[in-house]
Image (cartoon, helix red, strand yellow):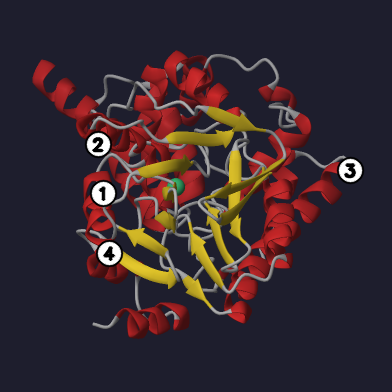
Amino acid sequence: MDQDQLFERLWAGTAAMEEWTAAVSGGAAIPIADGVIAIHTGYLFGNTTAIRTASGLVLVDTGSRETANQMLAALRRWDDSPVHTVIYTHGHIDHSWGAKLFDHEASARGIARPHVIAHRNVLRRFDRYDATHGLNSLVMGRQFNQPGYTFPDQHRRPDAVYDDSLVLTIGGVRIELFHGRGETDDATFVWLPQQRVLASGDFVIWAFPNAGNPRKVQRFAPDWAAALRRMEALKPAALIPGHGPVVFGESRAAQVLGDGALVLESLSRQTLNLMNEGRSLDEILRAVSAPADLLARPYLLPKYDDPEFVVRALWHLHAGWFDGNPAHLKPAPQAELAAELAALAGGAGKLAARAAALADSGRTRLAAHLAELAGAAAPGDNAIQATQARVYEQCAKAETSLIGRAIFAVYQREAQARQRRSTRTT
Ligand SMILES: [Zn+2]
């Protein structure tokens, strides 16, 4: 199918992003303006923007480990010039990993390797990645439900960094870099004023903003909204997002940027108002909701992150980790609480049975509490592990977000593994 027709169906919400991924898999170069292309390899892999200049190519982002070779091949079908400069929109590995391919290419050609430019915090990020390699492997494996996942190492560090904004003129092309915080604290959006093309990085990802991720470092929903407003004010004629298809046309680009800002502004305002009233996190989680009309937009569907996770991230941003429940300040060990409640209920099996009944009636949140308590009260009980696995499977099915589904699926699998172990030993 023609890319324009597919885009219209995505925009109307009648095509799924998986269809787009299938259409661009293997690497697709999309013409954006004179001397500018976007390269796609699939929704989960970061987009690359390539700019032709008299001094060589400039790249905005370099693709993911899984598909950077496809990105490189698509680029080289378009232009074989040396890569002069690489700009990272942030240090996440689905945007920065491919840079090493261009270093290898330059050394094979016997020329200077590309000059890599990024926000200053990318350096700190890569230092943190070195210090937390085991943790990141575990967190990413759980976020994407890929057991045995290994986080990359030897990140290609920038050669130059900037703080607030930076104007480059490379081979006659003006390229403006602006820093903002959003998914990360090291983000850059890139503006080509002559072509009126915006490369937003992950400020725009064709899904509800990934501003609440449960297992990652702090994210910045209010700053994210502010960055989207700054991008909106540029009035781009084409918007190249971090993930997903390019949005052409001033009014559509403005709509995507403005709606993204609106949903984050709404969640930030609601949460902060209630925090200022002294409400607990529990009360706030029940009271705050994202505007349903915005969440229904095909470019804001909560398929990756979850608005509820953003409320938690906002709480953490403004108020630290304590949730306002006194039992959570210095909690008893989970096993002690579980044993106490199991004794009151008449055994861990009672807790598990109730968990199963609640999950079957759709009350998966409550079911997860009781299933976890039952497992903690009787860790060697085969039947309870089986119930836990089934409850988490039902929890996963109830989630709209990839992250929520994946995390429950991981705990489902772990309960099944414990069940198999205890079956072998009994
Ligand atoms: Zn990304």
User: Contact, CB < 8 Å: mark 1 with mark 2?
Assistant: yes
Q: Which residue is mark 3?
A: 276
Q: Earlier in the sequence, mark 1 or mark 2?
A: 1
Separation of residues labelled 1 and 3 (CA atoms) = 50 Å
Q: Nearer the viewer, residue 173 or 317?
A: 173
Distance Cα–Cα, label 4 vs label 3: 49 Å
Whether residue 388 is visible to the viewer of this picture, yes or no, is no
Mark 4 vs 3, N-terminal side: 4
Type of amino acid at the residue the image marks with label 4? Ala
Residue 97: percent from left, percent from top: 35, 36
Which residue is found at the position 31% from the left and 50% from the top? Answer: 81
Marks 1 and 4, Cα distance to the nearest angstrom? Answer: 11 Å
Q: Amino acid at mark 1?
A: Leu
Q: What residue is shown with label 2?
A: 105
* Amino acid found under the numbered disc labelled 2: Glu
Mark sitting earlier along the chain (4/2): 4
From the image, which quarter does the C terminus lie in?
Answer: top left
Query: Identity of the amino acid at label 3?
Result: Asn
For disc 1, the marked residue is: 72
